[in-house]
Image (cartoon, helix red, strand yellow):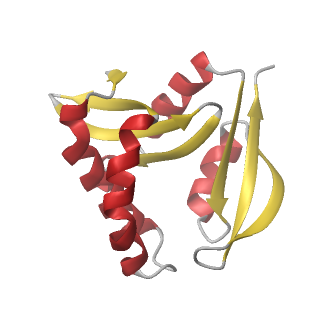
Amino acid sequence: MIRKFDIKDIDDVMNIWITENIKTHSFIPNEYWKNNFEYVKNILPNAEIYVYVEDNIILGFIGLNDNYIEGIFVDSNYQDKGIGTALLNKAKEIKQQLTLNVYKKNSKAIKFYQKNGFEITEENIDEENDEVEYIMLWKYN
């Protein structure tokens, strides 16, 4: 089931955020994520967040800021089971257009987004960590 984020979800969501960022982005030092943890925890409730819940356990979430996907995070124990796609489809139901940034080295995420109709529109450098990232776009047809 997908539902809107509630502030009581913050610890579960942030646990997924830190764990999956460290696992997925092995090319970025762990300290980068740890140093940004409190900042993200404080601003996260300002975003439009949807959580994927099964048996009262949050298995993943998507964060939106207008038409921008701040991120899709799924607990690695539950990846490749359609949770990320379900969260992305929820965003597609309520938005006519979506954009996101994804690191070039995160080939699994790039393939996921391309499979779901996103196209790479730009390439730039994330100034915070000097990593190349793609800007990707999806538009409702």
- Classify the position of the N terminus by image quarter: top left
Taking the spot 22% from the left edge, 29% from the top edge, the residue there is 54
Q: Is residue 33 above or below residue 17?
A: below
Classify residue 57 as left or right of residue 113: left
Classify residue 70 as left or right of residue 135: left
- Classify the position of the C terminus by image quarter: top right
Foreground: 108 or 120? 120
State the image coordinates of residue 103 (x, y, percent, origin top left). 63, 65
Report the residue that reaches farthest toward the left: 56
State the image coordinates of residue 46 (x, y, percent, origin top left). 43, 36
* Residue 99, quarter of the rendered image: top right
Q: Is residue 112 above or below residue 96?
A: below
Res 81 seen here = no
Foreground: 104 or 112? 104
Taking the spot 53% from the left edge, 35% from the top edge, the residue there is 64
Report the residue that reaches farthest toward the right: 121
State the image coordinates of residue 22 (x, y, percent, origin top left). 38, 70
Taking the spot 73% from the left edge, 36% from the top edge, the residue there is 117
State the image coordinates of residue 88 (x, y, percent, origin top left). 54, 32
Res 123 seen here = yes
Taking the spot 46% from the left edge, 35% from the top edge, the residue there is 47
